[in-house]
Image (cartoon, rainbow, N blue to C red):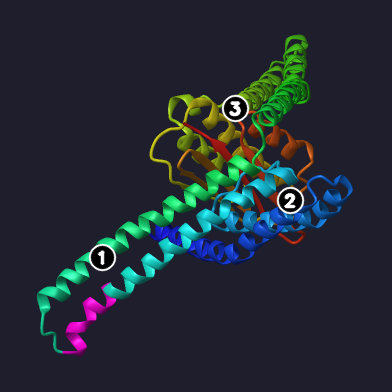
Amino acid sequence: MRGMARRGMRLTVGLLVGAGTVAVELPFIALSGLALLCVFVWPRGRRKVLEPVTAIARWLTESARRRLRFGGADFSYGYDDERALKYLAVRWLLGLLGAGVVLAVLMGATVVVWASTAWMFSHVEHPVDVAETGVGALFLLFLSLQAVFGVATLEARLARHFLGPTHERELQRRVAELASSRAGVVAAVNDERRRIERDLHDGVQQRLVALGMLLGRALRSKDEAHAAGLLRQAHAESRQALTQLREVAWRIYPTVLDEAGLQAALETVAERSAVPVRLTYRLTQEPETAVATVAYFVVSEAVTNAVKHSCAEGIAVTVDREENILSVRIQDDGWGGANASGSGLYGLARRVAALDGRLRVDSPVGGPTTITAELPCA
C-alpha cells in the first residue's frame, strides 16, 4: 500500500511537470511548424532552420525522458530527430489531459477535507447537502486518482511508440543478446569443466595416489605393527579422499537443491561457511529449477569469494521476489575492491546473463561489497 501511494505521488508530480512543459512545447511546435513551412521549398534555408529546431526538440525530449524515468517508466530509447519532433507534436495533448486530472485530484481532495472538517469549525445548517457533497467529492477523488495512473500509462506508451527502438532494431538487439549469452554459456561450461578437472587432479587424484602408495607399502611390509599403522593411515586417507570427492560433487550440483529446495541448499552454504552468514529468505514458493540453480551458485560463489579474499567478519544473504523478478543480494563487511571482471564474478555474470538476468557488483575500496543478481522467473 505504501509503495502504491509513493508511486502515485511520483506520477502526480510527473504529470504536473508534464503539464508545465506544455507551455514550452506548444509554442515551440507552432513556431517550428510555421518556420519550416516558410522555408519548405528552400532546401538550404530548411537545413538552417532544422538545426536549432532539432536541437531544442532533443532537449525537450530528453527532459521528458527524465520525467518518465522519475515516474518509473524506464525503457530503451532509439529515436532520431524526426521521431522526436513527432513525439512533441502529440505529447502536449496528454500534457493538458494530465493537468486536468491533477486539477480534479486537488479539487476532490479539497472538497473532501472541507466536508470532513466543516462539522468541527462551524455550524452546518444543511448537513445532508454537505454529506452528499463530500461523497461526490470522494467519488471524484477516486476517479481522478485512477486517471493519474491511466494518463501516466498513456504517456509511457506514447514515448515507447515514438522514442523506443523500432521492431527491426529490437530484433537485432535481441539476436545479439542471445548470441552473446550463448557464447557465455559455452565459455562458462568450459570453465566449469576445467575447474572440475583441476579439483579432481589436484585434490582427489593426489589422495588416491597416496592411498595406493600406503596400501602398497602395507602389503610389502613384513612388520605386522608397521603394516597395521600403514593401513590406519590408508583408511584416514580414504576418508579424506571421500570427503574431497563429495566437495567436488557438491560444487558441481548439490543434490539437496532437488531434494529439499533452494532455501535448504542456501542454509547448507551458510552452515559450511567459515564466516557467519545471515540468510533472509522471503520466497513463498519454490522457483523453477534453472532459476534456483543459478541463484544457488551466485550465493555459493559470492560467499566463497568473501571468505577467501575480503577478510569479512559477516555476510548477509537476502533472497526476495518482486513480481516476476527474483532478487539475490549478498553483502559482506570486508575490505571491498572486488574486481567484477575477475574469473569468478565474470563466470557468475555469464550464468545470470544466460537467463536474461543482470548481475551488479558494488565494491568500493574499504567495503562493503554488495553483489546483486536479478533473475526473471515465471
Instruction: Give the residue type at disc 1.
Output: Leu
Q: Which segment is the magenta one?
A: 112-122
Instruction: Give the residue type at disc 3.
Output: Trp
Say which quarter of the image contains residue 164: top right
Q: Secondary structure at mark 1?
A: helix
> Distance between the Cα atoms at labels 3 and 2?
72 Å
Q: Position of residue 51 (x, y in %)?
A: 83, 53
Instruction: Give the residue type at disc 2.
Output: Leu
Say which quarter of the image contains residue 301: top right
The residue singled out by tag 3 in the image is 250
Looking at the picture, does residue 205 appear above or below residue 22?
A: above
- Pointer 3: residues within 10 angstroms few (<14), some, or many (20+)? few
> Distance between the Cα atoms at labels 1 and 3?
60 Å
The residue singled out by tag 2 in the image is 37
Asked if residue 224 lies in the magenta stretch, the reply is no
Residue 279 in view (yes/no): no
Where does the N terminus fall, quadrant-wise? bottom left
**Could you tell me if the residues under marks 3 and 2 are in contact, i.e. CB atoms within 8 Å?**
no
Rendered image: mark on residue 138: 1
Looking at the picture, does residue 344 appear above or below residue 26?
A: above
Q: Is residue 76 left or right of residue 277?
A: right
Q: Is residue 292 left or right of residue 360?
A: left
Q: Position of residue 123 (x, y in %)?
A: 14, 89
Q: Is residue 132 left or right of residue 299?
A: left
Looking at the picture, does residue 19 appear above or below residue 166?
A: below
Q: Position of residue 202 (x, y in %)?
A: 78, 25
Magenta-colored segment: predominant secondary structure: helix
Question: Which residue is at 43% across, 59% downward?
Answer: 8
- Observer-nearest of 118 and 272: 118
